[in-house]
Amino acid sequence: MSRQAQRKRALCWIRRDLRLSDHRALAEATKAYNDVAVVFIFDTNILKRLKDENDRRVTFIHQSLVDIDEQLRKKGSTLLVSHGDPCIEIPRISKQLQCEAVYYNRDYEPYAKKRDAAIQAKLKNNSVDFRSFKDQVIFEGKEIVTKAGKPYQVFTPYKNAWLRQLESQDYKEHRPNLKHLMSAREIKPLSRPWSLKKLGFKENTLWLQAGERAARKRLHSFAKHISRYADARNFPAVESGTSGLSVHSRFGTTSIRELVRLAKSSRSNGSQTWLSELIWRDFYQMILDQFPEVTQESFQSKYDQIEWPGSRALFNKWCRGETGYPIVDAAMRHFNATGWMHNRLRMIVASFLVKDLLVNWRWGEAYFARYLLDYDLAANNGGWQWCASTGCDAQPYFRIFNPVSQSKKYDPRGAFIRQHLPELSNFPDRYIHFPAEAPIKVQNDAGCVVGKQYPQPVVVHSVQRQRALKLFKGVR
């Protein structure tokens, strides 16, 4: 009998892949082993860095785990949950359950790679296999490279190579055999209490439902509208204009392969545009994996020379949505209330912070990192560096969004602005995008005087644009 055939028990450690369906590591584990326990560790190394006890992400993770546990219980199993340092917890649990292997899906963030390497060394000493799989991206690492064998640093040629290399097997479903789950009777004694209160957190209200089953519903709903995604995605007031799946994608309550399968099921402009956005996701994960220094410095390092003159006072007004530019303020107030922001608005507010307020992009990146429900290090860093013109294949420094023009183009009737800045709701369309220009009679008729019920503009865009150009041109 082969050594593999003798093996009976394994752990499947879920991390940012909070689902049971189309799960590569779980599929491989249940293929090779008769008894597999699904485990999640509340990593205290991560939790202790969170500044808010009602952090929305912890609520989303917790609710998604409840969903998984309910599904496992129907199969006679249960979710094994612990909290602590995974470098201690994974070896401990695998030893107590007498597991011969730990299966997991790869993560490309610097901390995760360092943590996983340390766990692998410890498990090796205990003669336990530590088997990793590609699951959160379609192509990873150096699977997509230039003819010279180097990682791409420009998106369009990367995208073209990605599409040329894509085959159906790259996005096929990996279906676990849930008959090979360890019984709840064996798992329960090892599972620690995992209520949010026990973890030191409070439940937050989320703008969407968490969990794998909720992700599937949202995916099916978006499938009805994907054909118009190319046009509708830029208008924040259009509720069905985007998929709303970024949070589910971030925490893996749906698989990237399922998203690609949806994109490939249609040849509409909308589905192809959406596929391009999924490729951007792979691109930024690759950049983080191959160039981890981007977490500490500009991808184009010459721009680290810039001394940003923007003040903390201006930054704070940006954070609160008190800049006097309605599209920026509406976006930030909605973000503060929900932890989510429309992609077009992310570009507008980031450009405004960096190139109008002349504030270091790292401040904005850190603010988003604290409050984004769909926070992903690779995408957040990549997006901010793109807007700040410091990243790979970034927006050229001389392309500076005019917040008023952007507002008129993408929220023409001011529907989004009126929803989130009710004090401006009575302004006519002509002035809703920049009420500071409205005659005082119009302001009085609208019941909102700029400088009293709504802030005066903190800067003059045309002046700040020239200052931003000078900053970038001054880089040697």
Image: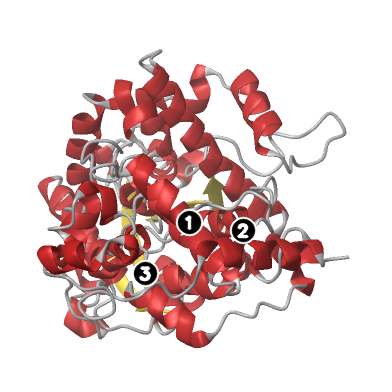
- Foreground mark, 2 or 3, reads 2
Q: Which residue is mark 1?
A: 100
Q: What amino acid type is highlighted by mark number 1? A: Glu
Q: Position of residue 62 (x, y in %)?
A: 23, 66
At label 3, the amino acid type is Ile
Residue at horizontal 80 percent and vertical 61 percent from the top: 473
Work out how far the residue at label 1 is from the one at label 3, CA to CA, in angstroms: 19 Å
Tell me which colouring the rendered structure shows. Answer: secondary structure
Residue 5 vs 475, above or below: the answer is: above
Distance (Cα) linking label 1 and label 2: 43 Å
Of the pair 456 and 407, the residue shown nearer to us: 456
- Examine the rendered structure and indicate whether residue 287 appears above or below residue 163: below
Q: Which mark is residue 346?
A: none
Q: What residue would you read off at disc 3?
A: 41
* Residue 140 left/right relative to 10: right
The image quarter containing residue 421 is: bottom left
Q: Point out the tag, 1 or 2, that comes first from the N-terminus.
A: 1
- In the rendered view, does 440 fall on the left or right side of 351? left
Amino acid type of the residue that numbered disc 2 sits on in the rendered structure = Gln
Most foreground residue, 447 or 270? 447
Residue 219 placed where, x, y %?
Answer: 25, 34
Q: Tell me, yes or no, whether the two marked residues, 2 and 3, touch with CB atoms within 8 Å.
A: no
